[in-house]
Image (tube, rainbow, N blue to C red):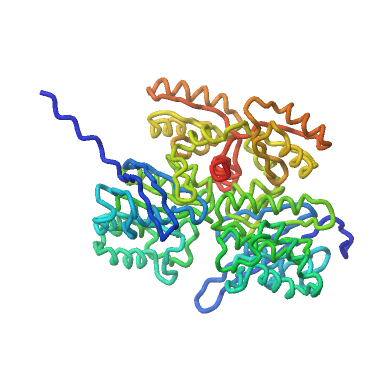
Amino acid sequence: MEAPSAPAPQPAIRVDNLTRRFGDFVAVDHVSFDVQPGEIVGYLGPNGCGKTTTIRMLLGLLVPSEGRATVLGFDSARQTEEIRARCGYMSQKFAIYDDLSVWENLRFYGGVYGINDRRRLQNTLAHVGLAGHERDLTRELSTGWRQRLALAIALVHGPRLLFLDEPTSGVDPNARRAFWDLIYDLAAEGVTILVTTHYMDEAEYCHRVGMMRAGKLLALDTPAQLKEKFVLGCVYEIYTPALLAGLKALEASPRVLRAGLAGDHLRVIAKKGVEASDLGSALAEAGAPAQTIQPGEPGLEDVFVQLSKG
Amino acid sequence: MCANGMADALIQATGLQKSFGGSHGVRRVRAVDGVDLRVSLGEIYGLVGSDGAGKTTTLRLLAGALKMDAGQASIAGYDIQKQTDQARAQIGYLSQRFSLYEDLTVLENIRFFSEVRGLPAREWKPRCLEILEFVGLAEFGGRLAGQLSGGMKQKLGLASALVSRPRVLLLDEPTTGVDPVTRQDFWQLIIRLAASSEPGRVCVLISTPYMDEAARCHRLGFMRHGRIITEGSAGQLRATLTDRIIELRGTPLAQLRRLAAEDPGAEDVRTFGDRLHVRLKEPQAQAFIDRLQAAARQASVQLEVARAIPPALEDVFMALTHGEE
């Protein structure tokens, strides 16, 4: 006899038509999405777009006006205690006590969650690679190590859902990479991770990225898919000494979807099928001949600008 | 025109040093440890590094907001230590601690800053309106500064730094916490200022912890532990890793990562969402890809994508600091 098949795994987060109004103002406008266990999802959008309000509803800190959300199987409006006990939150603005040691900070915050077991605290430190650094003074830690301590504090109670707010802002690339290796390990263990950030290179680390604007979720997909769907033309990098004149000429050209300044060159999104030589002629005609025109790679920033400006 | 005859260098500094602490049990830290800098008219120089690298202290030394322990700096030819007032008059400084008067309107704020900078009474209004127009805040003149979004506050900060027509802009992480669209707008403004023809053309020294911003500068200096460890244009720095960065996609990813790391040509492998980035020891991308394809077949690992990609500045930084921590 065949063994009964396992039930389909529940999403870690299920959001269905979630809406929140403040008077006439619709802060979150019928947002729906699923996040699977072990997924790392980035959540981007300009300030005031409804990101924070959405997260507050997921954490049960705010009641939705319409719709619902289920987090780790619990209803976000009615089972808020259960949700908060299973969520961890890591933020830049988090108060880590500079005068305390690594161990003292972890023990303090562990205590807040009712975790006093010494072995468990040690495991948490080991998990983030801080074993052996218990007595280091927090004030003297490098930014990379501070990030790890902040992560340890967010993990001390064994949450299954982690919220990271600009987690590697201001951290050098090596430390960032080490930090993300830890996050990938956690995801592989089934912890679900939601990251809010303003930085595209941080968003690139996520499995999927969601973009919000004016309360609406405009898109939620892998970085690769987002670039394919929303960068509607081909990217060129154009080096010309006459930057401003070149920009003006290209902005006026019907072949160009978008053009901008990028330090010492122009970054252009041209309509599909437009060749480098077409752009070269347009520039030469305008008296701003190009030195080099090379194809560029679409980035999440291009997606973001496309979605924000339409 | 500059006092010392070096026509182009608006910012020039050698051997800057500054330490903090050393009393009350706090360890003495060399925040800036021998920094040389030279920025010319029309240039945007990015000081790139993580928090604590020494960027803010460097900017404060150049702005004359902090006394250096050793070294020398001049702004538009004026020595910052001996001709402080003349040097400061050339500078527009936007610090991280910049704050606005929340209860005053946008126009009142910028008027205040222009008066503090000594702009004559008959000049403040047209100049302020011109500047607000430039940064895109013209319609918001009557709005209370406290009601502005973060991005708009930063734009107002930039406007305040520009109102006295400085030739040198010192910007300390001006886009922290600002959303990507506003950040783009902000950069367009800065690049425009640097690219415009005289008068009004500036040079810009901007600090940032973000590699994607570093890429927008003409030249950058990577800063670490108070020193500039390498300097050059984004193009020059990236060229050091040509044909050495590979993107891989396949399943199972963990296995693929192991195979890539085991290859003798691989210096570093890192995971990046659903793909891997490999940095090779030598510029031999195709040879590596060929070897990996064979290894993948043998190990029954499905290799979907294996291609050389243009290096990013992040790759450059990591290659430089490889093996240090």
Please name whichever residue, B281 or B207, is drawn nearer the observer in this view of the structure: B207
Which residue is most to the bottom? B24
Q: Tell me which corner region of the image, top left, top right, bottom left or bottom right, holds residue A82.
A: bottom left
Q: Tell me which corner region of the image, top left, top right, bottom left or bottom right, holds residue A274.
A: top right
Please name whichever residue, B313 or A279, is drawn nearer the observer in this view of the structure: A279
Please report the residue visible at 53 percent of the width from the left and 45 percent of the height from the top: A201
Q: Quadrant of the N terminus of chain A?
A: top left
Residue A4, given in percent of the width and then of the height, sits at: 15, 29
Please report the residue visible at 67 percent of the width from the left and 61 percent of the height from the top: B158
Query: Would residue B239 be found to the left or right of residue B267 on screen?
Result: right
Q: Tell me which corner region of the image, top left, top right, bottom left or bottom right, holds residue A308.
A: top right
Say whether residue A158 is visible. no
| Total marks in image | 0
Residue B204, given in percent of the width and then of the height, sits at: 72, 56
Q: Quadrant of the C terminus of chain A?
A: top right
Which residue is most to the left? A1
Please name whichever residue, B136 or B99, is drawn nearer the observer in this view of the structure: B136
Q: Relative to residue B197, is residue A254 depicted above or below? A: above
Please name whichever residue, B307 or B145, is drawn nearer the observer in this view of the structure: B145
Query: Would residue B261 be found to the left or right of residue B116 on screen?
Result: left
Q: Relative to residue A292, is residue B59 depicted above or below? A: below
Which residue is most to the front? A24
Say whether residue B28 is visible. yes
Query: Would residue A20 be found to the left or right of residue B63 on screen?
Result: left
Please report the residue visible at 35 percent of the width from the left and 57 percent of the height from the top: A154
Residue B266, given in percent of the width and then of the height, sits at: 52, 34
Residue A95, given in percent of the width and then of the height, sits at: 42, 66
